[in-house]
Amino acid sequence: MCKGLLGYNNLIVNTSAIVLKSFSYGESSLIARCFSEKNGKVSLIIKGAKKNKSPKAPYFQPLSYVDIIYNHKLNRDLQVLSKVNFRQYWSKILDDLYKVSLAISILELTDKTMSDNDPHPSLFLILKEVLKAFNNTLIDPKILFWFYECALLNNLGFQPNLDDPKLPGLVLPNIKNDSNCVVALSTLLSGNINQLQKIKVSKETSSLISHYLWNLIDYHFEGLSSIKSFKVVKKLLS
């Protein structure tokens, strides 16, 4: 991290961010975990957010896209928010329970797989594109979910090898017997969201892709299988 306005141990950070999760802290404050463009995942304390006169709580609902300024101290896990402004809230997602389930699972997947203060600006931009597409386009939501799973694997160093899918101790679904599955996965792994509308898959191929990607995610990141939202999504996509 570069030197900020207050020196190396006390930095003023100004960045855009997507709210992943928020919860109460004490009687009057909130803690929000956000995926920021500049610094990756960061945990913020929003002091007094629950007070009646505070306007800050609505900014930190999951799916909010905001600009934040906070004081980053290197020896502290919780950073203190100074200022927040809305950039966008993808409210149309909330009109569709299926989209809500997938979008919230994407946020939780991001939260559970990323380390604090580990910047991934490319993944941040993809998350923003995916949530925008959930909100504004007719792309099949499950394809957007797969696309983000692929982006997460690619950006965190676990890019799947479709030519040689073998991994120690992992039995993956046999994708090579379904040529449409391989083509679809190649498109998903390309990182180009504008190509997703070309993907057309049967129910059988859809199930194969879902199981293949989930098995990879579960293999590379511990503790995901027990999370309730992922269990729901697995049923939705099976």
Image: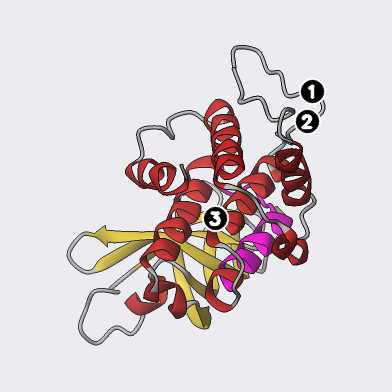
Mark 1 or 3 closer to N-term? 3
Between circles 2 and 3, the one closer to the viewer is: 3
- Is residue 163 found inside the magenta-colored segment of the image? no
**Which quadrant of the figure has residue 170?**
top right
**Which quadrant of the figure has residue 211?**
top right
Q: Secondary structure at mark 3?
A: helix
Furthest toward the top, the residue is 169
- Could you tell me the amino acid type at mark 3? Lys
- Is residue 128 found inside the magenta-colored segment of the image? yes
Evaluate whether residue 38 shows in this view: no
3D distance between C-alphas at marks 1 and 3: 25 Å
Answer few, some or many: residues within 10 Å of disc 2's Cα (few below 14, many 20 plus, some between 14 and 19): few
Which colour scheme appears in the figure? secondary structure
User: Residue, x 40% and y 58% (percent of image)?
Assistant: 101
Read off the residue under disc 1. 164
Answer few, some or many: residues within 10 Å of disc 1's Cα (few below 14, many 20 plus, some between 14 and 19): few
Read off the residue under disc 3. 142
Range shown magenta: 115-132
3D distance between C-alphas at marks 2 and 3: 21 Å
Q: Secondary structure at mark 2?
A: loop
Classify 97 as above or below 67: above
Position of residue 83 measured from the top left corner of the image (x, y, whole percent):
48, 78
- The one nearer the camera, 94 or 143, is 143
Position of residue 60 measured from the top left corner of the image (x, y, whole percent):
40, 71
Q: Secondary structure at mark 1?
A: loop
Q: Which mark is residue 161?
A: 2
